Amino acid sequence: MVNLNGTLITAAKASVAIDNRGLNYGDAVFETVRFSSGKICFWEDHYFRLMASMRILRMEIPMNFTMEFLEEELLRTINSSQNHKNSFRIKLLVWRQTGGKYTPKTNDVQYVISCEKLKTPFYELNEANCEIELFKDHYINSGLLSTLKTNNRLINILGSIYAKENDYENCLLLNENKQIVEALNGNIFIVLGNKIKTPPLTDGCLNGIIRKQLIAIIKLIPDFSLEEASISPFELQKADEFFITNTIQGIVPVTKYRKKEFVKETAKVLLQKLNLKARMG
């Protein structure tokens, strides 16, 4: 079942207008949320990121779009599933209502909530090899819009095709200054000794929920220091460890970049703490 503007309906019967602004102009934002152990992980952070994104895109936020209302709509959608006790990946997509061309006729919004079952109720360390490469055909523009989860993901799509064609598990995206911004599906962290480094939002990386959680976790660990600073491709050759973060997978260790191979020790430590934080809310 999907939730289309508050109405539960089968996915096969759900439809939107052919002149939907999200479809025609990329005039939409979304949140991908993890549901596990009977609750939505890091829901408050997801909610406030969604509200901030809607404000930046000049969408009219409905009066009933409170944190409690949207949480209830997410849970109602989950509970309509026959396997509602499982863990789920939930997507909440919000778009500006139909009307106008580049200039919208209204800033009012509509939404849809969909979900799919996940295999595990908690984050697990990926033990498989994860070889990555730079994607240099197109660049992310550093700036505020690049930090938002809009439905214009052409660079991510083209990078994913490039990775598939060349047998890489992931690729790294660069901004116009040739600095590494993020991976195709998440934020990045590198470890050099006891220093952990991640690109700043000003470089154009996604304002990721797990990125935020890990920054807070790392700051509480005396053995590590955290730096939000630009990362050049040359730094990858010096790093001891490299991992990718996102809401669904948690932490994904990178094992190889060109001739450089990485360990997973810091990722193991942080993953335990992330799981604990997710369970605590």
Image: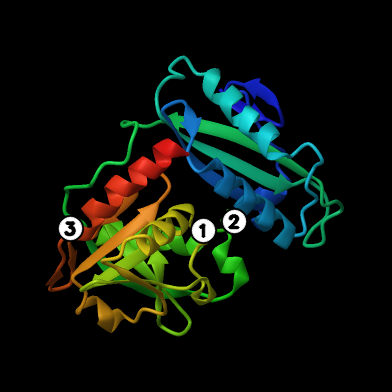
Q: CA distance from mark 2 to mark 3?
A: 33 Å
* On screen, residue 195 above or below 68: below
Left or right: where does residue 155 sit relative to residue 29?
left
Tag 3, which secondary structure? Answer: helix
Q: Secondary structure at mark 2?
A: loop
Disc 3 and disc 1 in contact, CB within 8 angstroms: no
Q: How is the image coloured?
A: rainbow
Residue sitting at x 51%, y 58%: 153
Q: Which residue is mark 3?
A: 265
Choose the circle earlier in sequence order: 2 or 3. Answer: 2
Earlier along the polypeptide chain: callout 3 or callout 1?
1
Quadrant containing the N terminus is top right
Label 2, on which residue? 150
Residue 175 rendering spot, x and y as whole percentages: 46, 77
Q: Can you give x and y, in whole percent of width and height, for residue 15 in the image? A: 66, 32
Q: Secondary structure at mark 1?
A: loop
Label 3 or label 1, whichever lies nearer to me, is 3
Q: Quadrant of residue 123?
A: top left
User: Camera-side residue: 180 or 169?
Assistant: 180
Q: Amino acid at mark 3?
A: Glu
- In the image, residue 186 sits, relative to residue 14, either above or below, namely below
Crowd band around label 2 with a 10 angstrom C-alpha radius: few (<14), some (14–19), many (20+): many
Asked whether the viewer can see residue 39, the reply is: yes
- Relative side of 53 to 63, left or right: left
The mark lying in front, picked from 2 and 3, is 3
- Which numbered disc covers residue 153? 1
Q: Is residue 188 left or right of residue 53?
A: left
Closer to the camera in the image, 126 or 158: 126
Observer-nearest of 152 and 123: 123
The amino acid marked with disc number 1 is Arg
Question: Residue at left 70%, top 54%?
Answer: 54
